[in-house]
Amino acid sequence: MKIKWLFIFLLLPPLLPAQEDAVPPAFTAGDIQLREAGFVNMAYPPFPKFYFDMRYAGTENFTGKKIYNFRSCWLRKEAAEAVVKAYDLLQKRRPGLTFLFYDCYRPESDQQTLWDAYPDPRYIAPPEKGSRHSRGMAADITLAGADGAPLEMPTGFDSFSPLAHMNYNGKKISASAKQNRELLKQIMLDAGFTYTRTEWWHFDKIGWAEYPIEDIQPED
Ligand SMILES: [Zn+2]
C-alpha cells in the first residue's frame, strides 16, 4: 500500500514557479542581444508596477510621425536600478504613486529617423553626436497614480514651451503642477540622475558617458 502512494506522488507534476519568477513571454533575437548588452525591460519583475506611454511608438509626439517599430521600454541596468531607487524614495514621500514612461532606450538608427523628421539641434541631438537615450542611460518619465493616470505637470510631454523648463515658476502653471514637478525632480536627483533645464520629464543617469551608443532593435 505504501509503495502505491509513493508511486502516485512521483507522478504528480512539479510545482509551478511563483509569479515573482515570471519572465517575459518571448525572447526575440533583439531582446536577447539587449540583455547581453546589459539592458533590462522595465515592464517585468523584479520591477514594481510601472506604466508606459511610449510616444515615439505612435504618432502622438512633436513630429506627428511614428519613429519606433517597438513599444517596450529598455534601460541600461545601472539606470534601471536608479529608477527603482527613485521609486522607493517616492513611496516614502507619496505612497502608492508610481512612474509613467514616455521614452527610454532609443536605438541609434531611430535617433536618425527622429532627426530626419525634425532636424533642429535645439530639440534633437544630431545623430553624429548621439542621444543619451541611445546609451540606455536616459528616461523620459512622469509621476502617475496607482491606476497609471499621470499627475498634473506644467506641460505635456515634448512641449517646447518655456513652461516646460525645470526652473519655470511663473503664474502660468498651477501650484500642484509645480509641486509634482519638484517632487519628481527631487527623487530623481536623490537617486543618481541629473535633469535637463528645458524638459521637466527628461533625466540622465550620472555616468552616462561611460556607456556606448547602441543600435540593437527591440522587437516587441
Ligand atoms: Zn528625453
Image (tube, helix red, strand yellow):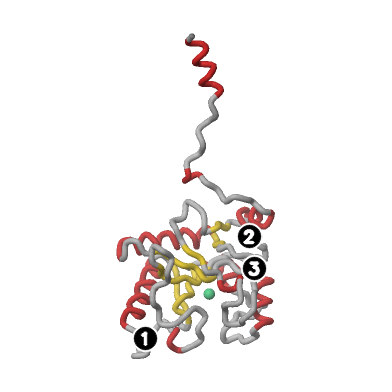
Dot 3 or dot 2: first in sequence order is: 3
- Nearer mark to the viewer, of 3 and 2: 2
How busy is the neighbourhood of tag 1: few (under 14 within 10 Å), some, or many (20 plus)? some
Q: What residue type is labelled 1?
A: Ile
In the image, 6 versus 109, the foreground residue is 6
Between the residue at mark 2 and the residue at mark 1, the CA separation in whole angstroms equals: 37 Å
Instruction: Relative to 28, say whether 198 is above or below.
Output: below
- Residue at position x 54%, y 70% from top? 103
Q: Name the residue under label 2.
A: 220
Dot 1 or dot 3: first in sequence order is: 3
Q: In the figure, residue 187 lies in which quadrant?
A: bottom left
How busy is the neighbourhood of tag 2: few (under 14 within 10 Å), some, or many (20 plus)? few
How busy is the neighbourhood of tag 3: few (under 14 within 10 Å), some, or many (20 plus)? many
Q: What residue type is labelled 2?
A: Asp
Left/right placement of residue 183 relative to residue 196 reads left
Between the residue at mark 3 and the residue at mark 2, the CA separation in whole angstroms equals: 14 Å
Q: In the figure, residue 48 lies in which quadrant?
A: bottom left
Residue that sits furthest to the top in the current view = 1
Cβ of mark 3 under 8 Å from ligand 1: the answer is no
- Residue at position x 47%, y 10% from top? 2
Q: Residue 173 carries which label?
A: 1
* Image quadrant occupied by the C terminus: bottom right
Instruction: Relative to 16, say whether 28 is above or below.
Output: below
> Tag 3's secondary structure?
loop
Q: In the figure, residue 175 lies in which quadrant?
A: bottom left
Q: Mark 3 points at which residue?
A: 107
Between the residue at mark 1 and the residue at mark 3, the CA separation in whole angstroms equals: 34 Å
> Tag 1's secondary structure?
loop
